[in-house]
């Protein structure tokens, strides 16, 4: 009966939408206000009692801050108070944030409350903003049966923008949870095909198709391909590029392949290249070979990765020749990797010759980012283990050392290793040789090495679970870790002990340890900017100090203490993010404190958002990332604390190893 009524309301509500120019009371957050600071401090300390005490305040801004704080805290005590706000607060803004906060609980227990509230909301609710937020929230916690009901509605028009976006977010969220409905996919496809639909709704629908490999385009692929060809919204086009390519349908290749040479936006090329292995190699070989000379390094990166996996063995000599002749030293390691990976195992002398060239190139470079890529290339042949141990595990550069550890996965699983160590006893001896070196690194107490090794030990395909007694070595290494600075390594170790011992442990969360610096925040205003100066140019950031005060305060303090000066961009994922701020330079670095996740109602729905990197909730510290394009799978999980206002060309151009020269804060 409940779901039946829900279905009726879903269908009726689109016909009851008033004009969207109705105004609501305005929330005004004042970071110099002591009460506002009290509420935000309670959010930071996760003090639910204080937060609850302000949820019934007569002051709208105080109520809003209290309810918004709940979006960052998972606690059953919040369910009922949030439901009361959702049902009874006179402010649309309040009811909308309450719905969002309930969704953030990620708990099936709140689904009934959300459905009942959807049914009871006034049908003249201001442009159905609340109902849209409720649909999104259900997507984070609801059942498959509810998804089917939500997906049945096809009557929402462009005038129902909140409902359209709420429905799309619900279907997308269900997809992230691995729950799908054919009717939901049809809704998303219809959103893409109808250009009158709001841009954010269409872009999210395209993301849904691109991100979920189990979603079938079916007989709509041809219509989507036609839309792709004429699409002017790059956020829609780049996601469609990936979704269409993933089908592997030869009939679509004439639409897709020319984009690799004609398209100027590398992000569209990137999404095609990620999925192009779905087609026969001969169909795209010539086009992708030309991309090895593409001026964009991210396009080269994905092209070389594709060729390494898909090129036939007889083409090894071609790639070896290109590797030897290229003048671009940053590209040599990947080209050598292709040549070595596709070369048949029986050509032992040639394999050894290529490995020797890689070793010589490794010796000739002093740049850690390039040395790391040579480490990855060496891991394609197990005979290179002694070099990886000496030059990688023994490197004084932490990025090189961590990369060498991570490359062991390739060593253990590549086809050459399996061909050499056919007998179980031989593979066991090879594995034990690695374990001996891992033990030395664990004894060193280096937190990054401990974290990387612990993560690697959980890889089933590497077979480390067969090694008896290594859990004791790991426990010994854990005793060298300090909290909270080494929390990521501690967490990795605990997860690995669970894996090795086939048990479950309570992994204690990091304790609160770093209060918000309100002096930093009260000096900022809406015109304040951060300027990240890199070797590639300057990036201007608008800081969201009202939305994420703890993160902004921390970033400003680190910037003004010159912490970021000289740090490198240690991670670049094509058409995803650049990441920097690691004091180690390998992604495992932090300082002796952590800050809290701030997960209010903000969305990674465009390029250029700056967010806090983390090892889980409330583990943020110094590292941040900037997005190349919309990344909605990060919504509600990673703090957004600003957005690029100038310099996106620099963001797109940055490579691993580029240096942050300075970060300047202009407060106005």
Image (cartoon, rainbow, N blue to C red):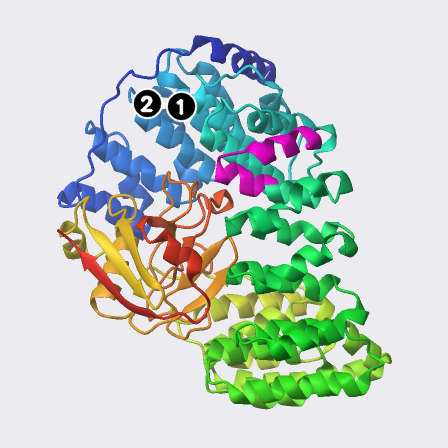
Looking at the rendered structure, the secondary structure element under dot 1 is: helix
Q: Nearer the viewer, residue 52 or 318?
A: 318
Q: Nearer the viewer, residue 153 or 579?
A: 579
Task: Relative to 305, say whether 566 is above or below.
Answer: below
Task: Relative to 399, say whether 191 is above or below.
Answer: above
Query: Which of the marked residues, 2 or 1, is nearer the chain's N terminus?
Result: 2
Cα distance between the residues tagged 2 and 1: 7 Å
Give how far across and how far down residue 552 sits, in percent. Answer: 27, 54
Q: Quadrant of the N terminus?
A: top right
The image quarter in which residue 311 lies:
bottom right
Task: Relative to 217, say whether 621 is above or below.
Answer: below
Does the magenta-highlighted stretch encompass residue 232? yes
Number of residue marks: 2
The image quarter in which residue 388 lies:
bottom right
Residue 79 seen in the current view:
no
Residue 260 seen in the current view:
yes
Looking at the rendered structure, the secondary structure element under dot 2 is: helix
Q: Nearer the viewer, residue 332 or 12?
A: 332
Give how far across and how far down residue 424 sits, in percent. Answer: 84, 79
Give how far across and how far down residue 578 sits, in percent. Answer: 44, 59
Q: Residue at x 43, y 24 (%)?
A: 162
Q: Are marks 2 and 1 in contact (CB under 8 Å)?
A: yes
Q: Residues within 10 Å of mark 1 (few under 14, many from 20)?
A: many
Give how far across and how far down residue 270 sits, in percent. Answer: 57, 52
Q: Residue at x 35, y 12 (%)?
A: 19
Does the magenta-highlighted stretch encompass residue 186? no
Q: Residues within 10 Å of mark 2 (few under 14, many from 20)?
A: many
Q: What residue does disc 2 label?
A: 92
Q: Nearer the viewer, residue 305 or 59?
A: 305
Q: What residue does disc 1 label?
A: 130
Q: Which residues are magenta?
A: 221-240
């Amino acid at each position: 009966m409940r779901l039946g009524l829900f279905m009726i309301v879903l269908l009726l509500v689109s016909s009851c939408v008033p004009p969207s120019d109705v105004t609501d009371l305005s929330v005004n957050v004042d970071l110099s206000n002591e009460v506002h600071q009290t509420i935000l401090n309670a959010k930071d300390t996760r003090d639910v009692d204080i937060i609850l005490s302000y949820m019934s305040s007569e002051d709208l801004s105080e109520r809003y801050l209290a309810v918004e704080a709940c979006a960052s805290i998972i606690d059953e005590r919040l369910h009922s108070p949030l439901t009361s706000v959702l049902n009874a607060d006179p402010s649309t803004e309040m009811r909308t944030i309450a719905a969002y906060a309930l969704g953030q609980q990620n708990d099936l227990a709140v689904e009934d409350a959300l459905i009942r509230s959807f049914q009871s909301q006034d049908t003249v609710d201001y442009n159905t903003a609340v109902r849209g937020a409720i649909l999104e929230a259900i997507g984070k916690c609801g059942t498959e049966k509810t998804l089917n009901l939500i997906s049945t509605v096809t009557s929402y028009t462009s005038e129902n923008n909140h409902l359209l976006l709420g429905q799309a977010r619900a279907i997308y969220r269900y997809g992230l949870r691995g729950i799908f409905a054919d009717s939901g996919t049809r809704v998303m496809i219809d959103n893409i095909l109808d250009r009158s639909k709001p841009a954010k709704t269409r872009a999210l629908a395209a993301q849904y198709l691109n991100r979920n490999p189990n979603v079938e385009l079916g007989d709509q692929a041809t219509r989507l391909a036609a839309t792709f060809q004429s699409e002017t919204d790059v956020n829609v086009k780049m996601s469609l590029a990936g979704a269409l390519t993933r089908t592997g349908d030869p009939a679509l290749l004439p639409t897709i392949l020319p984009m690799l040479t004609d398209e100027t936006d590398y992000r569209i090329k990137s999404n095609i290249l990620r999925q192009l292995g779905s087609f026969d190699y001969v169909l795209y070989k010539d086009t992708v070979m030309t991309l090895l000379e593409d001026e964009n390094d991210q396009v080269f990166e994905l092209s070389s990765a594709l060729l390494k996996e898909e090129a036939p063995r007889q083409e090894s000599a071609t790639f070896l020749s290109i590797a030897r002749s290229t003048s671009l030293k940053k590209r040599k390691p990947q080209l050598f990797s292709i040549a070595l990976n596709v070369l048949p195992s029986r050509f032992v002398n040639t394999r050894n010759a290529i490995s020797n060239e890689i070793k010589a190139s490794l010796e000739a470079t002093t740049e850690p980012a390039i040395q790391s890529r040579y480490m990855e290339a060496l891991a394609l042949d197990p005979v290179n283990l002694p070099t990886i141990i000496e030059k990688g595990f023994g490197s004084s550069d932490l990025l090189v050392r961590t990369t060498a550890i991570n490359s062991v996965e390739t060593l253990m699983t590549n086809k050459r290793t399996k061909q050499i160590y056919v007998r179980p006893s031989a593979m066991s001896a090879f594995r034990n040789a690695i374990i001996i070196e891992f033990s030395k690194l664990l004894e060193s107490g280096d937190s990054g090495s401990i974290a990387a090794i612990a993560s690697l030990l959980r890889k089933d395909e590497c077979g480390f679970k067969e090694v008896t007694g290594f859990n004791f070595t790991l426990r010994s290494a854990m005793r060298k870790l300090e909290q909270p600075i080494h929390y990521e390594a501690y967490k990795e170790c605990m997860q690995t002990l669970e894996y090795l011992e086939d048990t479950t442990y309570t992994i204690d969360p990091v304790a609160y340890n770093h209060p918000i610096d309100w002096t930093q925040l009260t000096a900022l205003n809406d015109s304040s900017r951060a300027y990240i100066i890199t070797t590639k140019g300057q990036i201007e950031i608008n800081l969201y100090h009202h939305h994420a005060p703890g993160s902004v305060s921390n970033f400003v303090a680190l910037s003004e203490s010159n912490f970021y000066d000289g740090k490198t961009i240690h991670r670049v994922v094509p058409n995803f993010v650049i990441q920097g701020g690691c004091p180690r330079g390998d992604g495992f670095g932090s300082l002796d404190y952590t800050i809290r996740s701030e997960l209010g109602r903000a969305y990674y729905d465009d390029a250029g958002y700056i967010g806090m990197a983390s090892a889980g909730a409330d583990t943020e510290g110094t590292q941040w990332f900037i997005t190349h394009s919309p990344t909605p799978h990060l919504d509600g999980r990673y703090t957004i604390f600003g957005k690029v206002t100038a310099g996106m060309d620099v963001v797109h151009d940055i490579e691993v190893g580029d240096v942050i020269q300075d970060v300047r804060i202009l407060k106005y």
